Amino acid sequence: MSKEKIALAYSGGLDTSVMIKWLKDKYDAEIVAITGNLGQQKEIENLESKALSTGASKFRFVDLREQFVEEYIWRALKAGALYEDVYPLATALGRPLLAKALVDAALEEDCTMLAHGCTGKGNDQVRFEVTFASLAPHLKVLAPLREWEFTSREAEIAYALEHNIPVSATKKSPYSIDENIWGISIECGVLEDPMVSPPEDAYQITISPEKAPDAPTVVELEFHEGIPVSLDGQKMSGLDLIIRLNDIGAANGVGRLDMIENRVVGIKSREIYEAPAATILHFAHRELERLTLEKSVFQYKKNISQDYANIIYNGTWFSPMRKALDAFVDETQKPVTGLLRLKLYKGNVTLLGRTSPYSLYNEELATYTEADTFNHKAAAGFIHIYGLGLKTFSQIHSGR
């Protein structure tokens, strides 16, 4: 009888390092460790040697950055997806792609089980496992953190030392951090008290707005059908544009977010985010839509934006509903083409100007100068008909 083979979503941190040995022993299985690169900077060095020395039979490193940008981030940006009007969904958006990469590798390696290192009260367990169910319902899913005997980080470290598992962590970091190119999420430690202002050491890439340069930075962004295609007049790939905007925004203190959010599992949590590029691009995209979308489309799309954000946050990316909403969003984005000039200054993003070949702004209709072409006399009849229903209601019900 052949051995079980487990595909493990591997980060190289304490949990997944311990997990390789634990899964291997518990299930008498071969472990294929798989890491997806979404642009994270930490804990990506020497991953292969670390995984193999810990007991994995094979290691796979998958560069997902371009796919993340083109197939996930741009879709979310075009939809205007901000969870509860604030969070640009960096971690949430990366999870379905990481889960898909794990499934793809598992099928190629003839694995019989999938394993992840998500906790039992977080959102990520939902996102991973719902994606697994959508893409490979026949594969068994293992979530060691929900069932193993370790009740603390110290217990995991002791297990690692006992079994000669090389882990760099010996002391718990005060924060739990997840990073990709669309943003960084920071939680735990003193951040669990909503009245405590985030300490400066919680932030990973952004400078404090108070310490940002005294001179503003002006940038120009060009969009084509809802997707940014150039920065300061230079055409560049989506990946390069986001990386560059992250650097520029972070240097100006842009993109710090602090919110109480509603988790999938029903609890509220306090989350700190850093998302310079996402903050700038969502702001610019929304302002270009104000200029180019017809009124009813612009106003209705806000409802779709919330629905789309909920789909991402709740882990149902691979759903018929998301695909259906994509069709609506793609149709709305056809005229969202143009140029915006923005000022970045001490944590703020300010609009300096915008133009589009599909602009619905007509200066001759909007002006109050002699160039005005608006028919003022037509307003009286419009108001009479527009208010007729309320006038009739008031006449019938007055005095009651």
Image: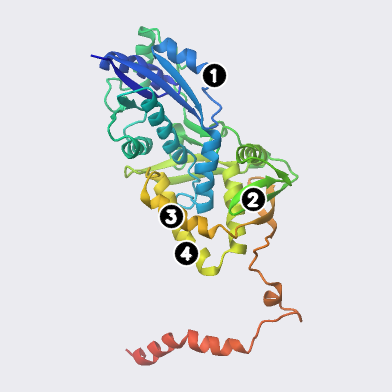
**147 relative to 270, above or below:** above
Q: Earlier in the sequence, mark 3 or mark 1?
A: 1
Label 4 close to label 3 by CB (< 8 Å): no
Q: Earlier in the sequence, mark 1 or mark 2?
A: 1
Callout 1: helix, strand or loop?
loop
Identity, as a three-letter code, of the amino acid under mark 1: Glu
**The quadrant where residue 56 appears:** top left
Which circle, 2 or 4, is nearer the viewer? 4
- The residue labelled by disc 3 is 325
Q: Earlier in the sequence, mark 4 or mark 3?
A: 4
Residue positioned 46% across, 53% down in the render: 326
Relative side of 390 to 374, left or right: left
**Dot label at residue 45:** 1
Which circle, 3 or 1, is nearer the viewer? 3
**Dot label at residue 151:** none
- The residue labelled by disc 4 is 300
Identity, as a three-letter code, of the amino acid under mark 2: Val
In three-dimensional space, the C-alpha distance between marks 3 and 1, rounded to whole angstroms, equals 39 Å
Q: Is residue 197 visible?
A: no
In three-dimensional space, the C-alpha distance between marks 1 and 2, rounded to whole angstroms, equals 35 Å
Which circle, 1 or 2, is nearer the viewer? 1
* Disc 3 packing (10 Å; few <14; some 14–19; many ≥20): some
**Dot label at residue 349:** 2
Which circle, 2 or 3, is nearer the viewer? 3
